[in-house]
Image (cartoon, rainbow, N blue to C red):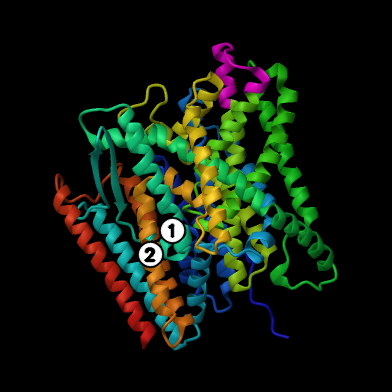
């Protein structure tokens, strides 16, 4: 009997931990600066293969563990979309290490536990594409095959290296400002305004190739609804003169995103109802697998953490959460209701956390972990938490009580947000593991370890940035304060619900639109036509067009490539080369983002590589020309390689 390759090893955990420390710090800074984080699974896999290649007994399974540990960095850092709100509302004067780390780690661990029963329903039995999971698996496979030769693997390695280099080089070029990173045009439509924005990003183009045409068309429908219907109507209702771009983007930020949050909310509920059956069957299968595993009859590739371990791990996380929440309330204006409030909050975290784990897992499968709108889920979570507190305490209390309620809502949301981000990531990792033959329970343990590593990094980095720059909206914020856009929005929502001035109209109209999109999707399904996933539509409305429109273009390019590949003598090999090319686009830009974050941090400048100033129009021409030329060249060389 052949010995199973090494998988969960100490060196793999330590390497994954080292990558996690670096990537978490980079993501915290970038997320606070621009409101986006980058996925770390693929760059972690690339780094892991480069390091572990020096060990003769390393394997694809060990590399998979490294990327699983490190993937926590790309998602756990998203806690910054909530916690800076505590500083913005004046409740915290910094980030206490123990409290910040506890919120981050406990929510993340619950995210792992709550998503374990979903693996069979969404990863094994489902038909979701899991684009980043597939991409990471392709990176691992091509790295493993290249160690053993083979003409096909050599082609794949050259494809991924070429697109990685092109993607990173173009990202570098945009940072010099010789080429634009985005093409945008804003214009008036009667008394209103709208625009068209496309990000010149190879990572977005590659992600589009991987998610498929159905999700892409759903996103395009969302763009059309949000930018070309809702935005012109809202701007026409309050005409302005002056800068059209600032006017349109302001209305999008203040109103259209709330509309999109309403669509995401109703689509999330619908998604949960659709997958309720498979989730229950998955839980039953997990229970059966746990019983079978005692007799060693179940294959290693099908063994999740035992149900008892999942239940015990969940309880082990909920107990310190109870102490944490009680400590937050002690000595404050809410102390008299502490016991009942903590009990209600634990029930809220458990129930809402389970719901969010299922929805976020589905979204990760549909659109990818890095493109999944978890901040939209954070919006819904903070509204729900705030409404729970309104039902208890009402509105219009003393200022001190309202401030305490807002802070408590943000802390509870932070825990739930940790569940959302890690469940979003865990299922993506498990898809990678399924494709490379990994052991699920070992990956689940590895992700818990990654959560602990990441939770140690978030507090000191947040404290450093708070002391160095501060955050926009906090008391005495300076000119160089970091925007932290999601945290600003989520804290504003908490204050709006508890203060009674939330823009419910936009959320309600969005929910009604989401219901219509659900009906459309069901009708298309019954007619046998291409479906338009409602969460994809919500994503297209909620996220900035600079990110989503390029993804749509990528889905069209990927569809055309797949149609060509289907006509080749070896369709599977040709399709795989296309996936590898798209994967390299993501790898190159992701690795560059890591490096650039370090350069920005060390230099203290927002644009440390800028070579010119006032070069916007020529940079746009250069950027578009180089971007299109590089994309054409990459796909042309991939088709040639597939035809050889």
* Rendered position, 602 above or below 587: above
In the rendered image, the quadrant that contains the C terminus is bottom left
| Picture quadrant where residue 103 is located | top right
Viewer-proximal residue, 446 or 262?
Answer: 262
Q: Which residue is mark 2?
A: 556
Q: How many marks?
A: 2
- Give percent across and percent down for residue 296: 81, 72
- Main SS of the magenta part reads helix
**Residue drawn at (39%, 52%), measured in percent from left and top?**
548
* Marks 2 and 1 close (CB-CB < 8 Å): yes
Residue 31 in sight: yes
**Residue drawn at (48%, 71%), measured in percent from left and top?**
139
Asked if the magenta segment contains residue 392, the reply would be yes
Viewer-proximal residue, 80 or 344?
Answer: 344
- Give percent across and percent down for residue 590: 40, 58
Viewer-proximal residue, 136 or 4?
Answer: 136
**Residue drawn at (72%, 30%), measured in percent from left and top?**
344
**Horizontal placement of 562 versus 202: left or right?**
right
* Rendered position, 399 above or below 639: above
Q: Which mark is residue 216?
A: 1
- Give percent across and percent down for residue 630: 27, 68
Q: CA distance from mark 2 to mark 1?
A: 8 Å
**Horizontal placement of 633 versus 614: left or right?**
right
Q: Determine crowd level at label 2: few under 14, some 14-19, many 20+ residues with C-alpha closer than 10 A.
A: many
- Give percent across and percent down for residue 271: 61, 50
**Horizontal placement of 622 versus 192: left or right?**
left
Q: Determine crowd level at label 1: few under 14, some 14-19, many 20+ residues with C-alpha closer than 10 A.
A: many
In the rendered image, the quadrant that contains the N terminus is bottom right
Q: Report the span colored magenta.
A: 390-407
């Amino acid at each position: 009997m052949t010995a199973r390759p090494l998988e969960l090893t100490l060196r793999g955990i330590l390497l994954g931990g080292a990558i996690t420390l670096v990537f978490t710090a980079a993501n915290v800074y970038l997320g606070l600066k621009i409101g986006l984080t980058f996925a770390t699974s693929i760059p972690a896999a690339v780094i892991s293969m480069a390091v572990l290649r020096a060990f003769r007994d390393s394997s694809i399974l060990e590399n998979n563990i490294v990327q699983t540990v490190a993937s926590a960095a790309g998602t756990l850092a998203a806690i910054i979309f909530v916690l800076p709100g505590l500083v913005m509302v004046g409740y915290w004067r910094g980030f206490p290490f123990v409290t910040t780390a506890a919120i981050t780690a406990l929510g993340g661990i619950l995210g792992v536990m709550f998503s374990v029963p979903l693996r069979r329903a969404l990863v094994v039995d489902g038909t979701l594409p899991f684009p980043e999971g597939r991409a990471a698996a392709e990176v691992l496979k091509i790295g493993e095959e290249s160690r053993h030769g083979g003409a096909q693997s050599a082609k794949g390695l050259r494809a991924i290296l070429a697109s990685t280099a092109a993607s990173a080089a173009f990202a570098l070029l945009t940072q010099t400002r010789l080429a634009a990173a985005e093409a945008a045009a804003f214009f008036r439509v009667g008394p209103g305004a709208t625009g068209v924005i496309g990000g010149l990003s190879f990572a977005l183009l590659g992600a589009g190739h991987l998610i498929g045409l159905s999700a892409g068309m759903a996103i395009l429908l969302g763009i059309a609804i949000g930018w070309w219907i809702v935005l012109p109507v809202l701007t026409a209702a309050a005409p302005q003169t002056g800068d059209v771009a600032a006017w349109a983007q302001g209305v999008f930020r203040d109103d259209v995103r709330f509309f999109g949050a309403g669509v995401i909310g109703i689509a999330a509920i619908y998604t949960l109802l659709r997958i309720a059956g498979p989730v229950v069957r998955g839980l039953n299968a997990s229970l059966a697998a746990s019983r079978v595993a005692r007799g060693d009859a179940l294959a290693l590739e099908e063994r999740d953490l035992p149900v008892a371990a999942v239940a015990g791990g969940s309880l082990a996380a909920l107990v310190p959460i109870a102490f944490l929440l009680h400590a937050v309330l002690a000595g404050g204006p809410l102390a008299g209701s502490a016991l009942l409030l903590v009990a209600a909050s634990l029930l809220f975290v458990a129930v809402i956390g389970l719901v969010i784990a299922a929805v976020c897992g589905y979204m990760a499968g549909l659109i990818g972990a890095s493109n999944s709108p978890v901040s939209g889920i954070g919006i819904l979570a903070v509204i729900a938490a705030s409404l729970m507190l309104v039902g208890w305490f009402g509105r219009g209390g003393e200022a001190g009580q309202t401030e305490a309620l807002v802070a408590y809502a943000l802390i509870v949301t932070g825990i739930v947000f940790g569940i959302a981000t890690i469940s979003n990531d865990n299922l993506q990792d498990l898809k990678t593991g399924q494709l490379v033959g990994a052991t699920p329970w070992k990956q689940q343990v590895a992700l818990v370890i990654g959560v602990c590593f990441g939770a140690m990094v978030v507090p000191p980095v947040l404290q450093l940035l708070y002391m160095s720059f501060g955050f926009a909206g906090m008391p005495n914020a300076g000119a160089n304060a970091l925007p932290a856009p999601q945290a600003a929005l989520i804290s504003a929502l908490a204050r709006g619900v508890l203060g009674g001035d939330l823009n419910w109209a936009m959320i309600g109209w969005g929910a009604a639109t989401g219901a219509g999109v659900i009906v459309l999707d069901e009708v298309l399904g019954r007619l046998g036509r291409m479906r338009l996933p409602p969460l994809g539509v919500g994503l297209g409305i909620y996220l900035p067009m600079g990110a989503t429109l390029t993804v749509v273009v990528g889905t069209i390019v990927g569809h055309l490539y797949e149609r060509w590949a289907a006509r080749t003598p070896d369709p599977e090999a040709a399709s795989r080369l296309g996936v590898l090319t798209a994967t390299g686009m993501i790898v190159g830009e992701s690795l560059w983002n890591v490096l650039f974050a370090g350069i920005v941090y060390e230099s203290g400048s927002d644009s440390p590589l800028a070579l010119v100033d006032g070069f916007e129009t020529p940079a746009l021409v250069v950027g578009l020309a180089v971007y299109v030329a590089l994309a054409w060249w990459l796909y042309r060389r991939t088709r040639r390689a597939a035809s050889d």
